[in-house]
Amino acid sequence: MEKRELESLLAQVAAGEVSADEAAGRIAMPPFSDLGFAKVDHQRGIRQGVSEVIYGAGKSPDQIAGIVASMLDRGQERVLITRIEPDQAREVQDLLAQGLSFESAGDEAGEGEEVPDLPVFTYYDLPRLATVGEMPEPDGVGKIVVACGGTSDIYVAEEAALTAEMLGNEVVRLHDVGVAGLHRLLAHYDELASARVVVAVAGMEGALASVIAGLVPCPVIAVPTSVGYGASFGGVAALLSMLNSCASGVSVVNIDNGFGAGYQASVINHL
């Protein structure tokens, strides 16, 4: 249950649409489900404002589908899965469509009974990210701008952008606006200046974050990518450059961590 869902439930109680006993029953449900291979945290949305996000790397399709199903069974409207490969995603979608991982379908449904309708499952190849459920309407204070230095950085930028959108933000994408051609970035000055927060994604020497931070009045979240030749050391050069930025207002996440940047940008945009 997310904070907004709890607020909605309480509003329904106030309006007389849901009884106090029924609401208490929903709230008093166990805070997590123990699936053996995972303990699914159902109260994270109430504590932190955002429900649990599934990190797909290293998990089997059965495990991912089980976690998703547990969240849906407890009323979660949408689920975000990061770092999931195409083959994994196809298997997860098939398992969910068959109802094999639903507690309600697998344990209680009899032969011939219909499997519950599933929220739409969408896979995004470039950032290796999947969503279950529709994107929510933006409810953040302003806009998040996600800018990337080169086309090769888009896979990380899209992970940040889609994460932010899934968390209820309006996102403006600026692709291929790196420092090798500053006129490309300056052509979007109005969009940058009106942002509530900017996510700057860059590999190579990672200078994009410093340039943007010198132009805008809002926080800049820098994301180093592993894009670059040998001496970039898989993104370490960009990471160190961003950590040593002389521009104020720059914070830095880990190499290729578009999810972390999109999440943090959403937190800022909902303050």
Image (cartoon, helix red, strand yellow):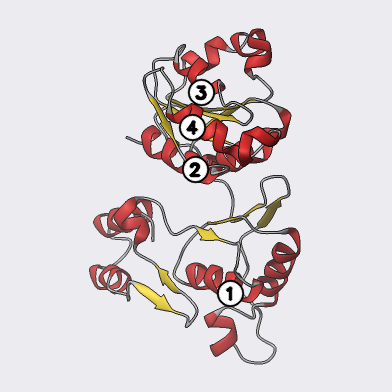
Going by the picture, which residue comes out furthest to the bottom?
A: 111
Q: Position of residue 207 (x, y in %)?
A: 55, 21
Among numbered discs 2 and 1, the one appearing first in the sequence:
1
In this view, the mark in front (2 or 1): 2
Give amino acid for label 2: Asn
Give amino acid for label 1: Gln
| Rendered image quadrant of residue 189 | top right
**Mark 3 — residue?**
209
Q: Is residue 64 above or below residue 79?
A: below
Give amino acid for label 4: Leu
| Rendered image quadrant of residue 24 | bottom left
Instruction: Give the alpha-carbon distance from disc 1 to disc 4, as whole Å.
Output: 36 Å
Among numbered discs 2 and 4, the one appearing first in the sequence:
4
Going by the picture, which residue comes out furthest to the front?
A: 231
In this view, the mark in front (1 or 3): 3
**Mark 1 — residue?**
63
